[in-house]
Amino acid sequence: MQSNDPHQDHTTALSPEQAMLVSIRDTLYEGSWEDFIADLSARAEGKPHIFDTITISSNLQDTIRSHLDLIAEIRSREESRGQPFHDNP
């Protein structure tokens, strides 16, 4: 059963890693997935970027791809429910 409160299911609806990405989006990118994605892409390309999600490692590209995939999943779920998830419900 879907709640009428758009924030009620925040903690149960997202994995810890997804919740972390929502928190980063809300805190550093003022709620903008587009800015977050652009920053991750810049990091992947070795260009200037705002935030390091992990320290530089041999699997950095895989981690960034994983984060981009998670963001795509979150955005799809936000579209399905008609409400964005927020860090601080």
Image (tube, rainbow, N blue to C red):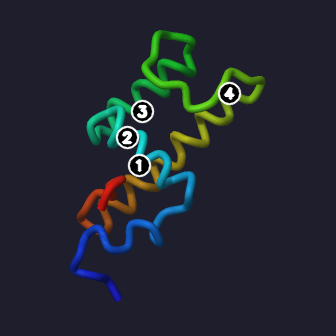
Separation (CA) of disc 3 from disc 4: 15 Å
Q: Nearer the viewer, mark 2 or mark 4?
A: 2
Q: Name the residue type under label 4.
A: Leu
Give the labeled residue for mark 1.
22
Separation (CA) of disc 1 from disc 3: 12 Å
Q: Look at the picture and state if 10 lies above or below 20.
A: below
Identified at 28% across, 82% down, the residue is: 3
Mark 3 or mark 2: name the one nearer the start of the chain: 2
> Residue lying farthest bottom?
1
Q: The residue tagged with tag 1: helix, strand or loop?
A: helix
Q: Are marks 3 and 4 in contact (CB under 8 Å)?
A: no
Identified at 23% across, 75% down, the residue is: 5
Q: Residues within 10 Å of mark 4 (few under 14, many from 20)?
A: some
Give the labeled residue for mark 2.
25
Q: Name the residue type under label 3.
A: Ile
In the drawing, what numbered circle is on residue 40? none
Q: Name the residue type under label 1.
A: Val
Mark 3 or mark 4: name the one nearer the start of the chain: 3
Give the labeled residue for mark 3.
37
Q: Nearer the viewer, mark 4 or mark 1?
A: 1
Q: Are marks 1 and 3 in contact (CB under 8 Å)?
A: no
Give the labeled residue for mark 4.
60
